[in-house]
Amino acid sequence: MKKRGRFKLHRIKTWKLFLLLVPLLFLDATLLRMDHIRMTELRDAVLEADKNEDDNEIVQRLEELRNFTRSNIVINVMEDNGEQKIFFGTGPFYLEHQYIRAANKALEEAEKTIADDSNPNGNIYQLASEVCQPQAIANGWSWSDANYINCMVGEIQKYPAADELNDKIAASLPSTELYRKDFASPIWAPTLTGFMIFITLIIIVVIFIRGIIWIILRLSLLFV
C-alpha cells in the first residue's frame, strides 16, 4: 500500500505534464510580476524621498529596496543605449535631486571664491548669473535645476581668468556615479516564486528528456 501511495513522476503521462505545465507557467509569470511591482513601488519611494530632499528617508528607502531586491527574483526590462535589455534587479537609476544639492554646494563655494572685485574680469559669478537667470526665468528653471547649474558652469568657463577656478569646481563637483544606484537580484531565491519556478523547470526537463527518448526510439525503429 505504501508503494502504491508513493508519488512517482515517471508514472505520470506526458500529456498530463503538459496540462500541468500551462497553469504553472501562468503562476510563475504572475508571481514574477508581483515581485517586479513591489520592487517598482520601493524604487519609486526612493525617488520620491529624493524629490522631497529628505536624506534620512532616502537612506531608509534605499535599504528597503536593497533588502527586497537581494532576497527576491526581480526581472526588469529597461532601455539601455536605445536597446531593450533584461536585468536581474532594479536596473540603474539616479538620485538626481541629491546630486543637484551637492552640486549647488560646490557652486556656492565657487561664488565665494570668485566674488572678488580684484579679478580682472570682475565678479565672474555675477556675470554668469546675469546670463543664466533670465534663461531660468524664461524656461521656468529653479535655482537647483540641473539646466541652471550647467548654464552657470558653462558661463564661468568662458573667462580665461577662471581657469584655476574651473579646476576647483571640477574637483569639488561630486561624481554622478556616487548617485547612480543599481541593485542586483539573484537568479534564484528560496521564495514562493523561486520554488514554483524550480518545480516548473523540473517538469520541463522531464518532458524534454522524454521527448529525446521518444525520438531515439523512433529512429531506432527505422533501422530495425
Image: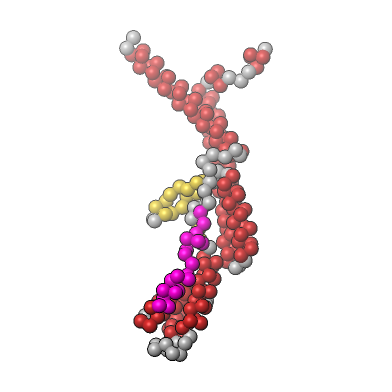
Residue 207: say if magenta: no
If the image is split into quadrants, where does the C terminus sit?
Answer: top left
> Which range of residues does the magenta coloring cover?
164-182
Check the image and name the residue furthest to the left.
Answer: 223
- SS assignment for the magenta stretch, majority: helix
Q: Looking at the image, how many numbered discs can be counted on the residues?
A: 0
Residue 58 drawn above or below residue 21: below
Placement of 148 over or under 39, stated as above or below: below
Left or right side of 154 for 24: right
**Residue 173 placement (x, y as % from top left):** 47, 70
Is residue 107 positioned above or below 184 on the image? Answer: below
Front in this rendered view, residue 47 or 223: 47
Q: Residue 173 colored magenta?
A: yes
Q: Quadrant of the N terminus?
A: top right
Q: Nearer the viewer, residue 54 or 6?
A: 54
Viewer-proximal residue among 194 and 21: 194
Which residue of the protein is positioned furthest toward the top in this rendering? 224
Q: Residue at x 40, y 16 (%)?
A: 217
Tell me which residue sits at (54%, 39%) in the image.
188
Q: Let me know if residue 28 appears in the view.
A: no
Asked where in the image residue 51 lies, by quadrant, the reply is: bottom right
How far across and down, in percent of the image, does residue 154 sit?
A: 40, 76
> What residue do we see at 36% from left, 12% from top?
221
Residue at the farthest right position? 1
